[in-house]
Image (cartoon, helix red, strand yellow):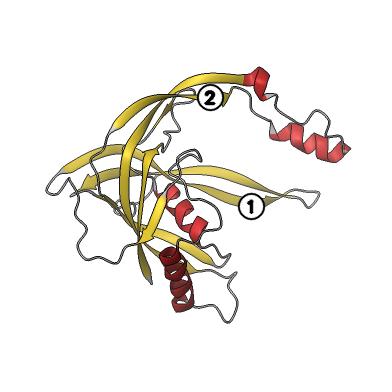
Amino acid sequence: MSIKLKVWGDYACFTRPELKVERYSYDVMTPGAAVGILEAIFWHPGLHYRIDKIHVLKPIQFTSIRRNEVKSRMASSGVKAAVKKEAFGDLYLNTKADIVQRAAMVLKDVGYVIEAHFDIGPEANGTDNPGKFQDILKRRAKKGQCYHQPYLGTREFPAGFALWEEGEIATPYDGQEKDLGIMLHHMEYTPRRLNEGAVVYDVEPVFFRAVLRDGILSPEEGGVLR
């Protein structure tokens, strides 16, 4: 079962992970960001989205903006210690003291069509089936329903969305090929049980070689890199 979803927005930032301080966006939406938009519209534990193609509807344009961010991060070790001791008094970030203004290179006036299918996982129950999930997803997309506002890379850049029911998808890059380099595909979370029985997740980034052909990014075309 497949679906085509049109998404758009004034700005987008699909941050390159190799740049730590100043944000710099990829040229095109990442597959992980596309999955996040679909899950914002309809999520189920037994439903696993797979991105087949991302169609670029508008010319790729960058612009520089300045954004307020916090320079500190809350360490997971501090959170675990606070939970263990049941002492949460110091478990906070003082945004007034930690705020800093940083530049970001973001995309402007973006539009995409996400073409995806989904797999049914073992978490699904006996009454779940692909046709049921597809009908629910399409109905929610048509009505503009979502669990939370979808966004284009970062939460301050909300995404409009609508079910794509038209025919051919036109892009400004027909007949062109553009090598986008190595792009983040998704973050893979592998559960690991500790000696005391608690479960933690090992996080591993998964990349792929991104090539924009005729305005279409196909994440599964060349396999993934770990």
Q: Secondary structure at mark 1?
A: strand
Residue 68, labelled with which disc? 2
**Residue drawn at x 37%, y 59% as measured from the top left:** 162
- Taking the view exactly as shown, the residue that stands out farthest to the bottom is 127
- Taking the view exactly as shown, the residue that stands out farthest to the front is 143
Q: Position of residue 57 (x, y in %)?
A: 25, 49
Q: Is residue 4 left or right of residue 17?
A: left
For marks 2 and 1 on the same chain, the one whose residue lies earlier in the sequence: 2
Nearest to the observer: residue 148 or residue 34: 148
Q: Quadrant of residue 87?
A: top right
Q: Position of residue 77 (x, y in %)?
A: 73, 33
Which amino acid, by three-letter code, is at mark 2?
A: Asn
Residue 35 in sight in this render: yes
Figure check: 203 above or below 47: above
Mark 2 surroundings: few (<14), some (14-19) or many (≥20) residues within 10 A: few
What residue is disc 1 on?
Answer: 191
How far apart marks 2 and 1 lie (CA) works out to 34 Å
Q: Position of residue 11 (x, y in %)?
A: 38, 38
**Residue drawn at x 20%, y 48% as measured from the top left:** 213
Q: Secondary structure at mark 2?
A: strand
Figure check: 185 above or below 77: below
Nearest to the observer: residue 72 or residue 7: 7
Figure check: 115 above or below 175: below
Residue 226 in sight in this render: no
Which amino acid, by three-letter code, is at mark 1?
A: Pro
Question: Which quadrant holds the C terminus?
Answer: top left
**Residue drawn at x 37%, y 44% as measured from the top left:** 9
Q: Is residue 167 left or right of residue 113?
A: left
Residue 150, labelled with which disc? none
